[in-house]
Every structure is written in structure tokens, then in C-alpha cells.
Image (cartoon, rainbow, N blue to C red):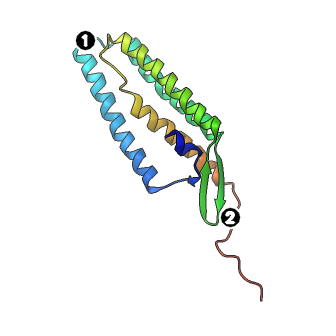
Amino acid sequence: MLIQQIRVRRLVSAAGLSLLGFLLVLGVATVIFGVAATQQSGRLSAAAVAVMASTLPVAVLAGWLRSRTVKVWRSGSTLLRQGGIATVGLWVAWVAAHAGLDLWANRLSHGVLGSSTLWLAMFVSLVTQLALLTRRSRALPRVPDRVPSIV
């Protein structure tokens, strides 16, 4: 994932959209499973739910920050993007922040909750980043695929 951030690639691709769909399904399933397991053990507290829920606004913030570090441009009719070292650094910082929140939620649930929000938070973060990059790309000038020849 980190190497992908510094490569030039399409803004939107079928593989990227498939990954988002996979993360959404996996994320919702793991949150449901984590909450159900915690509830079954009788260790689901309001504090654990609050910490768990806080991972989502943190994911939105991370996606917004990363989107600010990614270049977007048009090559013909193709929209391209490329992040840099700052993008990679923000990914590492987000993973560390998420891990810290997961450990806190896990402690509040006496070890039952685990990292159940990781995949959903990753989905939220990536969707935020993509939405902001797509919005920014709309302001780019349109360039024709072929320049007509002058006769």
C-alpha cells in the first residue's frame, strides 16, 4: 500500500473500486462480529463503543490530509495521481493512530473487541481521499485526446 502511494496511477480504476467494495464488506462484517462477541461476553461498554466510533472521524481526517499531498493531473482523457513521501508518512501516522485507538478499545472491552474497526476505517479513509481527489480533478482543464492538424 505504501509503495502504491508514490507510483503514478489512474485516479479511479476497476481494481481500486473492487478493493473499496471488498474493504466495505469486510469492514462491516468485522465490526458486527466484534460488537457481537463483545456484547456476548457482557463487556461492551459505552466507553469502548465511543473509542471504536472515534476511529471513523480519525479515518476521515487522515483521508483529507493525504488528499492534500497527492498530485492530480490529466493526461489526455485520463486522470492520474501520485503521492509522495508526505503521503506515505501520513499513512504510517494514521495506522499508528488507529492501532492506538484499537488497543484502547480492546482494553476497555477486556480484550474482546480487538481491531474490529480497521477495515471499515480503511474504507472510510480511502473513500474520503478518493472523493476529495475526484472533486479536485473536476477543476482541471480538459485536454483533447488528439490535437487536430492544421491544413
Report the disc number at residue 142: 2
Give the alpha-carbon distance from disc 1 to disc 2, as whole Å.
58 Å
In the image, is 3 to the left or to the right of 27? right
Quarter placement of the C terminus: bottom right
Residue 66 figure quarter = top right
> Outermost residue, right direction?
151
Q: Are marks 1 and 2 in contact (CB under 8 Å)?
A: no
Residue 47's place in the image compared with 97, above or below, is: above
Residue 56's place in the image compared with 112, above or below, is: below
Residue 139's place in the image compared with 103, above or below, is: below
Residue in the picture at 57% in, 49% down: 7
Report the disc number at residue 24: none
Residue 45 locus on image (x, y percent): 35, 12
Q: Residues within 10 Å of mark 1 (few under 14, many from 20)?
A: few
Give SS at disc 2: loop
> Outermost residue, left direction?
40
Residue 120 figure quarter = top left
Residue in the picture at 41% in, 46% down: 19
| Mark 1 lies on residue | 42
Pick the front one: 117 or 7: 7
Residue 49 locus on image (x, y percent): 39, 18
